[in-house]
Amino acid sequence: MRDLRVSLVQAATLWHDAAANRALYGELVRGLADRGDLVVLPETFTSGFSNDAVGRAETMEGDSVAWLRALAREVCSVVTGSMVVREGERVFNRLLWARPDGSVEWYDKRHLFRMAGEHTRYAGGEARPVFELHGWRVLPQVCYDLRFPVWTRNRFDAALQRLDYDLALFVANWPAARRYAWRTLLRARAIENLSYVVGVNRVGIDGNEIAYAGDSAALDPLGQPLVELGAQAQTVTCTLSAQALQQHRERFPAQLDADLFTLDTGSR
């Protein structure tokens, strides 16, 4: 592992306009060229968080995935964020992990926000992948997943002598009305999992008149902020220290006392 430079891109996603959002986020990301290793966009960055976006879902061969791959190549960084993707008869809220070499991995949002009816329109994911980047192991998560600590639990592998991941990444459209929960849970996930946490939320007001306060942040394993964004459109790059992470885990090896369990990722 070496230090990891992460760029947080917080903006007001445009409602149901993929082309305009590609232009918006493309300009912001290009301004970060050569600054970092990982660029993080919000949840559903091509449409906003909307059940009606199902009708506009793109495939993995569509314009937005091709654009994301090209953008990652252009800025020589991994670029990630979620969008609405159709596979056959099912539609997913899918976090895409686009690498500069043109390859793409993904994570399908596991926990669907029933209070907005997301579970009636979208399919939930069943896999919990961990992505590798410059020696770091990164757990991708989407918005409502933040409320489920068992799903995000950083388990210790005694045989490999390592935890599942080093950085938990949350992309979101988290409303301002629940901003205290967002800020609190990000800190809890960092502290309990001995891990860095990065959360990237949107700002502005969406097509359903829901307001978003941003509050994107990068937190160290003690839950202390490296950067905290406000309620305005903003981009910032910060550095996650590999040495600081290793030293914290050596000083405070709580993973050695954690309860063992298996995670059932099958259908519910």
Image (tube, grey):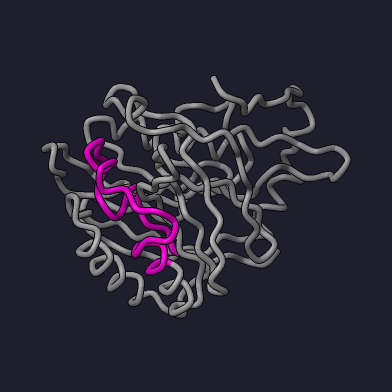
Decide if residue 26 is on the left or right side of residue 209: right
Residue drawn 41% across and 55% down?
227
Please name whichever residue, 234 or 224, is drawn nearer the observer in this view of the structure.
234
Residue drawn 71% across and 34% down?
155
Residue 48 located within the stretch drawn in magenta: yes
Residue drawn 31% across and 53% down?
45
> What number of labels is visible?
0
From what the image shows, is residue 113 above or below residue 127?
above
Residue drawn 42% across and 37% down?
90
Please name whichever residue, 136 or 267, is drawn nearer the observer in this view of the structure.
267
From what the image shows, is residue 199 above or below residue 70?
above
The x, y position of residue 35, in whole percent, is 45, 76
Please name whichever residue, 207 or 120, is drawn nearer the observer in this view of the structure.
120
Residue 62 located within the stretch drawn in magenta: yes
The x, y position of residue 84, in whole percent, is 35, 47
The x, y position of residue 98, in whole percent, is 50, 63
Decide if residue 78 is on the left or right side of residue 131: left
Residue pushed farthest right?
A: 159
User: What is the quadrant of the N terminus in the image?
Assistant: bottom right
Q: Which segment is the magenta one?
A: 39-68
Decide if residue 1 is on the left or right side of residue 44: right
The x, y position of residue 14, in whole percent, is 18, 54
